[in-house]
Image (spheres, rainbow, N blue to C red):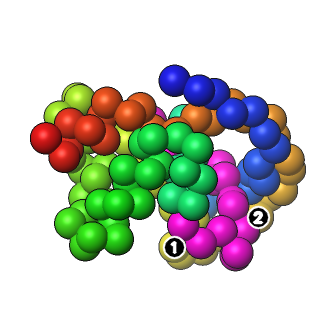
Amino acid sequence: MMIIEGKYRQLSFYTIRGITKFIDLGDFSYGEWIVYDCWVPKYHVNVFDEQYNSNFLIKSLIENKQETLDSIIDKINVNEGVKLSFGYRPLFIEIVQKSELVDLELGPLPEQWVKNIIE
């Protein structure tokens, strides 16, 4: 699997449960998601970056209205026994503690995981 190193904006929020960290792609990141594995940012899905076959397969599934990204993640969790999720900003009371750029090595979802959904 290809690992892509880059800078991402990490927001830290005070919430009722304590400090929550969230990777923010910004308001203009249509077609992009950060996927967390056990609440740690691990994958960057970008359906417009067809350099990686898994992104191309995800885009095809979504465009053909066969799947949504939520259903793809749910099926991968069941098939592969992982705990993938999307990072969500806190819904209720949120106070931004800090905003910083962090270096992360995030790759696309493993191609075989996406292929297992199609088969």
Q: Which residue occupies 53% across, 75% down?
A: 92
Position of the C terminus by quadrant: top left
Residue 23 position within the rendered picture, expressed as x and y whole percent measured from the top left: 66, 52
Q: Please determine whether, in this image, residue 119 is positioned above or below residue 60.
A: above
Q: Position of residue 62 (x, y in %)?
A: 33, 66
Q: Residue at x 70, y 75 (%)?
A: 28
Q: Is residue 95 above or below residue 55?
A: below
Q: Residue at x 31, y 49 (%)?
A: 73
**Which residue is identified by label 1?**
91
Choose top left, top right, bottom left or bottom right for residue 7. top right
Residue 24 on the magenta segment? yes
Which segment is the magenta one?
21-37
3D distance between C-alphas at marks 1 and 2:
13 Å
Q: Residue furthest top?
A: 1
Task: From the viewer's side, name the closer residue of 95 and 100.
Answer: 100
Question: Is the residue 56 above or below the residue 15 in the image?
Answer: above
Asked if the residue under mark 2 is in contact with the one under mark 1, i.e. CB atoms within 8 Å, the reply is no
Closer-to-camera residue (95/77): 77
Q: Is residue 102 above or below residue 88?
A: above
